[in-house]
Image (cartoon, coloured by chain):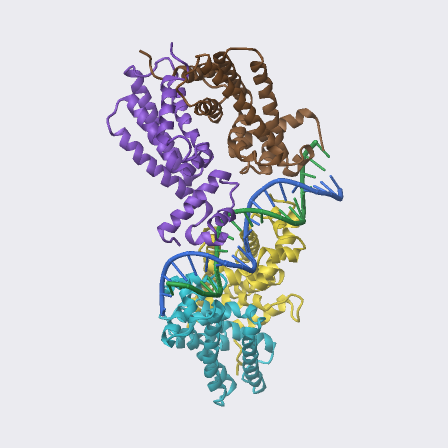
Chain colours: A cyan, B yellow, C brown, D purple, E blue, F green
Amino acid sequence: MSASPERREELLATAAEVFAAQGYNATTVRKIADAAGMLAGSLYYHFDSKESMLDEILSTFLDELWARYDAVLEAGLGPRETIEALVTESFREIDQHRAAVAIYQKESRHLQTQPRFAYLADSQARFEKAWLGTLERGVATEVFRADLDIRLTYRFVRDTVWVAASWYRPGGQHSAEEIARQYLSMVLEGIALRE
Amino acid sequence: MSASPERREELLATAAEVFAAQGYNATTVRKIADAAGMLAGSLYYHFDSKESMLDEILSTFLDELWARYDAVLEAGLGPRETIEALVTESFREIDQHRAAVAIYQKESRHLQTQPRFAYLADSQARFEKAWLGTLERGVATEVFRADLDIRLTYRFVRDTVWVAASWYRPGGQHSAEEIARQYLSMVLEGIALRE
Amino acid sequence: MSASPERREELLATAAEVFAAQGYNATTVRKIADAAGMLAGSLYYHFDSKESMLDEILSTFLDELWARYDAVLEAGLGPRETIEALVTESFREIDQHRAAVAIYQKESRHLQTQPRFAYLADSQARFEKAWLGTLERGVATEVFRADLDIRLTYRFVRDTVWVAASWYRPGGQHSAEEIARQYLSMVLEGIALRE
Amino acid sequence: MSASPERREELLATAAEVFAAQGYNATTVRKIADAAGMLAGSLYYHFDSKESMLDEILSTFLDELWARYDAVLEAGLGPRETIEALVTESFREIDQHRAAVAIYQKESRHLQTQPRFAYLADSQARFEKAWLGTLERGVATEVFRADLDIRLTYRFVRDTVWVAASWYRPGGQHSAEEIARQYLSMVLEGIALRE
DNA sequence: CATGAATGAGAATTCATTCAT
DNA sequence: TATGAATGAATTCTCATTCAT
C-alpha cells in the first residue's frame, strides 16, 4: 500500500488538477483514474482513500507555503516589505501549485470542521496572526492607513491574493512576479490616479 | 407541479443557505428537507429537481443584480462614480442575498459548462463588459491609473468585491454600505499611507 | 368514498384508455388525473386505489363478456356455429371496450398470481373449457380437422381473436362484424386458395 | 464500463427472463440482480442502465431475426414457400430467444415512441413490407385468396405467430418445427374440415 | 502494479396515498 | 367533490472501496 514516491507525486498532481477543475465532491475516483490512465481500483494501491489524496495535496501545499512565509517573517523586514514579500511568495506558490491553491480556496472552509483537516484551521489562524500583526505594525509605524478597520483590511488583502488562483494560468502573459508587482501596487496605492 | 410562490421562496431561501454552507454537491436533498422541516420527497412537490432549485436561486439573484447594475450603468455617471455605485450595489446584494452570492462565487465556474447554466457565462461576459468598459473610460479620462494591466485590474476589482460574500454575515459590526465605503477606499486609494 | 356512478364510469373509461396506451405499471395516478382534468389526490374520493380501478375495469369487462359468452354457449348451437358466435361476440366486445380488452391482454398473465385477481385465472379456465370443449365437439362430429393438436388449435383461435385488440380502432374502415367475418373465414378456411 | 462479453450475455439472458416474466416496468433492477446472484448496484458495472439492458436485448434479437428473414427473402422462393419459411424461422427464433420475443411482443408498442427505440418502428415497417409484399405476390399469383382484406390478413398472420411466444416453453411436447408446421397448416388451410 | 468484478452505503427521484381545508 | 401539501416506501443509479488474480 505504498509505492515509488515519484508515481505518487504524478498521481497527486493529476488528482489535484481534477479536484481544482471540478471540485472535490464532484470529482469521482474514476475521473482521476481516467486522467491517470488507469482503473479506479488501481489508485488504491497508491493511496488509502480519496480523502487521503486531498489531505496530502493540501498538507504538502501548506507545508511548502509556510516554509516560504516563515522565511519572510523571520527576515526582520519592515511592515510594507513584509507584505510585499508575503504577497510575492503567495503568487509564486500559485504559479507552482495552482491546483492545490485553487482547491484550498474552494474547499478549506467546510473541510476545517473535520478533525482530519483541523490543520487547515490552525493554518488559517497562523495566517491571520501573521498578516494582521504585520498590518498592525504598519499602522503603528504610520506605514499603513489608520482609518480602516484592520480586520476588513486583513480580509481584503488575503482574499485579493488567493482568489487569483481561480483564474491564473501558468505560462500566461504575465509572470507570477509581474502579477504580484501589479497587485501589490493596487493594494498599496489603489487604482485611482493621484493628482 | 409548482405551488404557491411564497412557499417556494421560503424553501429556496432554506436551500440557498444549505448550498452556501456546504457546497452544492455536498448538499443532499435530505439536508435541505431537514432544514425545511419536511421529508426529502416532499421537496419534489415544489421543485423538479435539486438542480432546478440551484437554477432558480442563481437566476433570481442574477436578474435582481442586473436590474441594479443596469440602473447604475444607465445613470450617466463618471467612471469613478460608476465604480463606486457598482461596488456599493454589489455589497447591498451580498447583504440581501448572501447565500446566493456565495453559491454563485463557489459554483459558477464549473456550472457554466452545462447548457442549463449557460446564462452564467453570458452574465459573466456582461460583467466584464461593464467593469472593463468603465475602467477603460477611467483610464482615458485620467481618473484611473494608466500603468496597470487593465484586465488584471478588472479581475482585481471584481474578485475583491465578490469574495466578501464568503465571510460577510448580515447584522455584523459594519453595515453593507460601510463595508462598501471602506473597500472602495482601499481599491481606489490603496492601503498605504500617503505621505 | 363513493360518488355518482356516472362520474365513476367516466373516470374508469379515462383510466382504461391510459392503462391501455401506456401499460398499467407505467401509468401514474397523476397521468390518469391529468387526463380527467383533476389532481391526483382527487381520484381517491372516487376510488380506493389505482389497483381497484384496474380491478373494476377488468371485472366489469369479464362480467359483460361472460354474459355474452354464456348466452351463446346456452343457445345449443353446433360447434362451428358456436365458434362463429363466440368470435363475433369477442370482436363486439373489442369494439365496445377496446381499452379493457387491451389491458386484459397485456396484464392478465402476471396479475393472475395475485389473490385479488384470482378471478382472471378462473375466467381463463372457463375460457379454455368453453373453447376446448367446442373444438373437441367439432372434431368428434367431423366439423373440424382431427389431425391438429387440439390445445395448439385452442391457443391459435384464442390468441388470434384477442390480439386484434392491440391494433383495432373503433370507427375504422371495417366494422367489428366485418372483421369478425373475415377472421372467421381465415381461421376456418385458411388463407390459401383452394383449388 | 463494459466488461467481458460472456458475462454480459449471461446477465442479459437473466434480465430477459425476468423482463419477460414480470414485464419491463414491473421488473426492478434488484430482481434482476437477485436472479443473477449479485447486488443491484453491481449490474451497473456491466450496463449503463436498466433501459440499456432492454435496448441490448431487443436490438440483439432483431438483428438476429433480420439475418434469418433476409436469408429467406433473398432466396427467391414462391409466396407460399416464403410465408412457410418466415413462419418457421419465427418459431425457431421463439424457441431460441423466447424471452426476447415475449418482451418485444409486450413492450414494443409503447417503446416505439421513445427516440432510443425508434429502431423498433423501423423494424415494424420492414416487417410489414416483407409480409405484406409476400401476401400480395401470393394473391397476384393466385396462391392466396383474393377475397380477404390484405392488411387484415397481414395482421392475422403476423400476430398469430408472435403471440405464441407468450405461452411457448422450449422443451415442451412439440418442437418449434412441429408447432410451426401445425400453425402453418391452420393459417394456410384453416381449422375446418374440408368436405 | 494493475485489472476486473464486485460490494454496500447512500444519493436523487418517483409515486401511490393521505388528509385538512 | 376537489385542492394543495405533504408522507414514506420503493426505485434507479452512483461511487468509494475491496480483493482475488
Residue C51: image x %, image y %? Answer: 61, 35
In the foreground, C98 or A73: C98
Q: Nearer the viewer, residue A92 or D27?
A: D27
- Residue at 42% across, 26% down: D159
Query: Residue D30 appears at what percent x and percent y?
Result: 51, 49
Q: Is residue C123 above or below residue B54?
A: above
Residue D114 falls left or right of residue A119 = left
* Residue A184 visible to an observer of this rendering: no
Q: How many marks?
A: 0
F2 with respect to D142 (left or right): right
Furthest residue toward top: D195
Q: Does C116 sit above or below residue D149?
A: below
What is the residue that sits farthest to the bottom in this orientation?
A76
Quadrant of residue B184 within the rendered picture = bottom right
Regarding residue C72, the answer to whether it shows in the image is yes
User: In which quadrant will I find the N terminus of chain A?
Assistant: bottom left
Q: Residue reaching furthest front?
A: C140
What residue do we see at 52% from left, 80% from top? B192
**Residue A114 point in image, percent of width and height:** 57, 71
- In the foreground, A175 or A139: A175
Nearer to us in this view, B124 or C17:
C17
Residue A168 horizontal/vertical position (percent): 42, 69
